[in-house]
Amino acid sequence: MNDAAGVARAVLVQAFGAYRYDNSYVADAAAQYPNRFVAVCIVDALHRDASRMLDYWVKERGVKGLRVVTWTEPELMLDDPGLDPLWQRAAELGIPVCVLTNFHQVPRLKRVLERYETIPLALDHLGLPRLEDGPEFIHEQIIFDLARFNSFYGKFSSWTLAAVARNGEQARRDFFRRLLDSFGERRLMWGTNFPASNDRSYQGFVEYAEQQLAFLPKEERRWIFGETALSLWPVLR
């Protein structure tokens, strides 16, 4: 699948909806193919043993990142001080953290970014913004505002590309030009969201993303489609 799509290396991010806190599948896959994959795990962030659980997946199972997911019952709040031990442990372990949340929680990341500035923090799907108000994209201003934190990375997906494309070609160009002007290409990266998004094959998602962003300069695309992720997970080199 990866070979057919021309993808040599990839980050396997735990699918919360399918497997919750059992990261065995992605951990096993990364362990079996260490030259091709690294794994990012999810732990129960407010559990009293959350830091110990993270230690297990990182130290014993070889996982290289953490994903914090707010889609819980009740909803996990990103600025809850109860998460501080987990943020702190991620900082101590020196691993990147991906955040999967809905857009109304994106402003809460400000506290995390201020307190844990050594953690490379990537916002999955850019926080799932509506992207209905182009070309100004006023609703998405918080994304551009948080880009002032050097440890904050924009991680967009095929979902993001499809959402912004509904505004027309010029809006798509304007939105990504603004993203790049805010983050720079070295803090912006793309992911397929496959297989959660399944209206195309994996190869189809790669081709779709390349086509949608073909208007960008080659060097920017080189970072978005690979170099940024490699800078966060250099073991893949």
Image: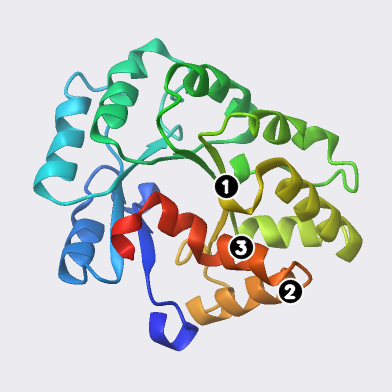
Where does the image place residue 74, in percent across and percent down from the top left?
Answer: 42, 23
Gap between marks 3 and 2 measured at Cα: 14 Å
Give the residue furthest to the bottom: 4
The residue that appears at 47% across and 83% down in the rendered structure is: 6
Give the residue furthest to the top: 81
Q: Disc 3 or 2, which lies upstream in sequence? A: 3
Q: Amino acid at mark 2?
A: Ala
| Residue 155 seen in render | no
Where does the image place residue 155, in percent across and percent down from the top left?
Answer: 56, 49
Above or below, comparing residue 108 to residue 182 in the picture: above
Callout 1: 10 Å neighbours few (<14), some, many (20+)?
Answer: many
Is residue 234 or residue 199 the one in the foreground? 234
The residue that appears at 35% across and 19% down in the rendered structure is: 83
Which residue is under mark 1? 187
The residue that appears at 73% across and 68% down in the rendered structure is: 217
Where does the image place residue 55, in percent across and percent down from the top left?
Answer: 15, 35
Q: Disc 1 or 2, which lies upstream in sequence? A: 1
Callout 3: 10 Å neighbours few (<14), some, many (20+)?
Answer: some
Point out the image quarter for the C terminus. bottom left
Quadrant of residue 10 in the image? Answer: bottom left
Which residue is under mark 3? 158
Nearer the observer: mark 1 or 3; the answer is 1
Gap between marks 1 and 2 measured at Cα: 19 Å
Q: Secondary structure at mark 3?
A: helix
Above or below, comparing residue 118 to residue 7 in the picture: above
Q: Which numbered dot is residue 214? A: 2
Q: Amino acid at mark 3?
A: Ser
Q: Secondary structure at mark 1?
A: helix
Is residue 83 or residue 149 the one in the foreground? 149
Q: Disc 1 or 3, which lies upstream in sequence? A: 3
| Residue 23 seen in render | yes
